[in-house]
Amino acid sequence: MPHPQPAPTPLGLRGPAFGGDYNPEQWPEEVWHEDVRLMREAGVTMVSVGIFSWALLEPEPGRYDFGWLDRLLDLLHVNGVRVDLGTPTVAPPAWFYRAHPDALPLTADGVRYAFGSRGAICHSSPAYRQAAAGITEQLARRYGTHPALAMWHVHNEYGVPVSACYCDTCAAHFRRWLAARHGTVEAVNEAWGTAFWGQRYHTLDEIQPPRATPTVGNPAQRLDYARFADATMRENFTAERDILHRLAPGVPVTTNFMTALSQCESVDYWAWGREVDLVTNDHYLITDGRRTHVNLAMAADLTRSVAGGAPWLLLEHSAGGVNWQPRNPAKLPGEMARNSLAHVARGSEGAMFFQWRQSRRGAEKFHSAMVPQAGTDSRVWREVSALGADLGRLEGIRGTRTVADVAMLWDWQSWWAQRLEWRPSEDHDARERADTFYAALYDHHLTVDFAHPDADLSAYPLVVVPALYLATEETGRNLRRYVEGGGTLVVSYFSGIVDADDAVHPGPYPGALRDVLGLTVEEFSPLLDGHTVRLTTPEGAPEGPDLTGDVWSDVVVPRGAETLWTYADGLPAGRPAITRNRLGEGTAWYVSTRLSGPDLDTVLGRALADAGVTPRTGLAHDVEVVRRTGETGTYLFAINHTDAPAGVRLDAPGTELLTGQGVVEELTVPAGAVRVVRLDG
Ligand code: GAL
């Protein structure tokens, strides 16, 4: 739900942020002058600086060399480029590890990582914490009032590449965390179900991190460790943030998230969203044949949602191909601008990149950049400059909010729990369900907000729950309240099964949701690989096409819910497969098998009708229409991901901001292009 206050924005920026990670320490200083000239030419408004610069800034413990950064910030300032200044704490120097080898993280298998990459950090290490606080304090004192400073960029992508360490320092820290969470060793025994397999602890001191075990380790212990690792990184973020707030009051503090579920799995962004002043996100296209623009839209919606609906900022994406996938296609003409503006449509206050100038050395020399190896006589540079100009035309969108139609529940902690081993089927994948439900809503041209399961959902006519294995009783009550108040809820299988300790709710499945769904599940009956089940409508129910499910089926016992489809084969043949429970003013749907494509669409279409949501019609597949609205007006973004021109009907006339043309009734978006209409009135 929206934050009561407008989110802080980078200081000194009038319009959208445009620029990228700038690593000038990789270049002789004469190149810096060329850089700022090109930045002005391309309309760059802000760059992120110093993210990996610790070894240069503090060449030996307690000796600082700020000369180069002073010169750089002054140069950027006189050229009108704002600075998102990094605390370099993701890359401690070699001298630090030499003095503190135990600050390198230990894997669950007992392997100690080595220096020579980045992000090799044991977040419990007192030496790391002290050194990180030291450099952060130095930077805050030196640059906190520098006129170029727009905001602070703490660390880099917490959780990537390593989130958890399993060393003895972490073990002691984990025991303190457990004492705070559970109180006593008895409570830990209870929560973890240690009566099973003789795992009972007699004192907290006996407890270790969930290191490699001969067979499956205690799932509740592993879930708590995932929470602990996330909380430990957050402790380090808030420690730096508090130093910056204290020494440089009024300057917004962020750390770049990676909300795409395919890119970072170990961070509970609901919790992090509350700690940053401004939510920022990094997003990279995963080019594995899936529809990258749908994944992008989902990540952008998720980012906006962890920002409480407020505007946020895309801090990194790529001008072209990345270099860390098996195959890294270049972006096609127009694709970069489409990607950038799709993030803006969904709430970003600009588009920033990794990185400004492509490196000649190091691990990322084949990663695209705003200034490619080919220099400025290149398609990438021309597209970068054109994007800078386009963003300059969108000043008015600042502070406006994206309008969502429906909501999807998502909970990282439930995902962590569900992914542990020895579940009924390894083919059930929470992320796949979230992706598939999201794509179905996207294809109905609906804009999706994500919500935490305990959030107030009353603003949404429809809420989908693609995978919520872990759901507390409080969540059950929240969903019941939502439905009774008139909401339409669609719940997919294997949801509402366990509580916060990964213990199965007492009584038949799905304990937390029996009530709202009006049914119980007597047995799970997961399907073998490649097997399917057929679903038909029973007599008396509204007619519908036969459907096909795979991966999962349930033996459902209706307890108030009506049956809309039954299983025609499989173990549950003749039993309900898809049900609807009318409760208070609303309805709760249950989908007990894995539906995809048109079959999922059929069911969602019915639920949308229940909810009174009319999906936009008359829009071509893969033409995206999203609105932002606020004090400066309403802006309609139309993004054409197809190879043919697309028509978009407008409900009010307006001005297309990228071409400056007036439009009435019908907007034409050329193939692969984006149009942004400021609607009149
Ligand atoms: C990001 C990271 C950047 C750069 C980029 C390459 O995750 O923050 O520093 O490595 O990936 O795609």
Image (cartoon, rainbow, N blue to C red):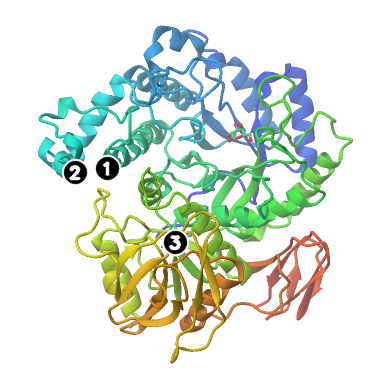
**Crowd band around label 3 with a 10 angstrom C-alpha radius: few (<14), some (14–19), many (20+):** many
Q: Kindly identify which residue carries mark 3.
A: 552
Q: Which of the labelled discs sits on residue 220, or is there none?
A: 1
Q: Is residue 275 visible?
A: yes
Q: Quadrant of the C terminus?
A: bottom right
Camera-near label (2 vs 3) is 3
Q: Is mark 1 within 8 Å of ligand 1?
A: no
Q: Quadrant of the N terminus?
A: bottom left
Please name whichever residue, 368 or 56, is drawn nearer the observer in this view of the structure: 368
**Is residue 117 depicted above or below 527 in this figure?**
above
Q: Quadrant of residue 470?
A: bottom left
Please name whichever residue, 158 or 14, is drawn nearer the observer in this view of the structure: 158
Q: Is residue 629 visible?
A: no
Ligand 1 shows up in the quarter that is top right
Residue 273 in the figure: left or right of residue 403: left
Please name whichever residue, 525 or 605, is drawn nearer the observer in this view of the structure: 525
Q: Is mark 2 within 8 Å of ligand 1?
A: no
**Crowd band around label 1 with a 10 angstrom C-alpha radius: few (<14), some (14–19), many (20+):** many
Q: Kindly identify which residue carries mark 2.
A: 193
Q: Which numbered disc, 1 or 2, marks the residue that appears first in the sequence?
A: 2
Residue 206 in the figure: left or right of residue 352: left
Residue 134 in the image: state x and y as whole percent. 40, 20
Residue 422 in the figure: left or right of residue 8: left
Separation of marks 1 and 2 at Cα, in angstroms:
8 Å
Q: Which numbered disc, 2 or 3, marks the residue that appears first in the sequence?
A: 2
Separation of marks 1 and 3 at Cα, in angstroms:
24 Å
Mark 1 and 2 residues: CB-CB less than 8 Å, in contact? yes
**Helix, strand or loop under label 3:** loop
Three-letter amino acid code at the position of disc 2: Gly
Residue 424 in the image: state x and y as whole percent. 37, 53
